[in-house]
Image (cartoon, helix red, strand yellow):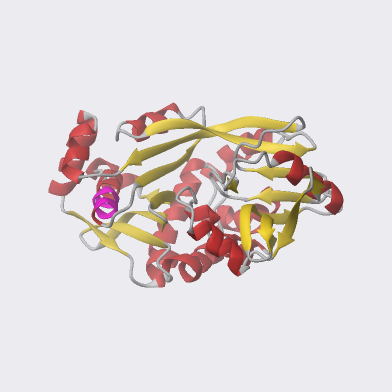
Amino acid sequence: MSTDGRTMKIIPADDRRWLEFVSGRADARPYHHPAWTRTICETYGFEPFVLALGADEDALTAGIPFVSVGGRLRGKRWVALPFTDSLPPLSTNGLELAPLVESAGQEAEVSSIEVRGPLAGPEAHTMTRGVGHTLALSDPDSLFTGFQSQVRRNIRKAEKSGLTVRLAEESRELTHAYYDLHAETRRRLGVPTQPRRLFESLWRQMVEPGLAFVLLAYHEGQPVAGAVFLDWNGRIVYKFGASAQRFWPLRPNNLIFWDVIKRGSENGARELDFGRTDLEDEGLRAFKASWGAVEEPLVYTTLGRAPQSGGQLSDRLLRPVLRHAPIWLGRRLGAFLYRFAA
């Protein structure tokens, strides 16, 4: 695993040196935290590790968290990380990591290595897989004036409609109240629903330790919208969102985002990451930009076997079926399929 005398080593995902390394870096994201790796591995049964570069046994200078997926049919692959919007490698010295990562993969006999971030190298296949939107947080009143007029009107409408936004304090508020909205939303979108165990793990691994939180919007005591945010190292990341369509005229999603902007600003967060958006989803891109968020491409990298796009056709064929199927079908398909979608 060496190039030019440097060696990347496989260390356990829960190695104290990795947590110490990411905790000392301003550019580390919630997805770099070992708790996120534990969440997806506990849910889907992946084998986690960190590919790390160290000056000595006690200090790391670069690293990327991975899981090992695949096997006999698809070939063994390393992915950093599945179900993760953006995970750029971390390095203290700007070292070009692609040759080191590729060398490590060749020694481990993996067919490909996928990184949710840019990696420069002669054998690297890069592809823009969506866009991200980030909003620098500051004084909420100043930010409010920078929102597009429609956003300001929708926030005021939501505030006058009797909606309230509350922070989830018990696991059932995520695994039942939010999850019911989530399953309904996934059916409306025509995509499988993530298994409930993902949100159970997310509560244990991230919400309880203070690395994530859940906001729910209520109307007359009924949850009508909700969102899950990862929150660590000065960055809040919008990860999951769901809402009941019949309550859209009340603008509950606008109120949730306004609440998290105020909450993050007051608690010293530097920025709000609105999450990944597909390139073709112009409506959602416009919605996120209307909050003053800056759009940037999300570049992913594959080393080894070139990335395949065959799954897009099956997704398009499945979508109309799920939109008209009972919710339980989307949940069962999600519980079975997501592990193989990594």
Task: Please say whether residue 16 is visible from this viewpoint.
Answer: yes
- Against 93, residue 178 (above or below) is below
Magenta extent: 259-265
Q: Give me the residue at 69% from left, 49% from top.
A: 79
Q: Give me the residue at 71% from left, 38% from top.
A: 302
- Against 312, residue 173 (above or below) is below
- Which quadrant of the figure has residue 320? top right
Whether residue 142 sits left or right of residue 277 in the image: it is: left
Image location (x, y in percent) of residue 75: 83, 48
- Against 205, residue 326 (above or below) is above
Whether residue 244 sits left or right of residue 41 in the image: it is: left
Q: Is residue 15 magenta?
A: no
- Against 59, residue 318 (above or below) is above
Image location (x, y in percent) of residue 285: 41, 31
Q: Give me the residue at 59% from left, 41% from top.
A: 321
Task: Please say whether residue 154 is visible from this viewpoint.
Answer: no
Image location (x, y in percent) of residue 238: 41, 49
Pick the residue in front: 89 or 94.
94
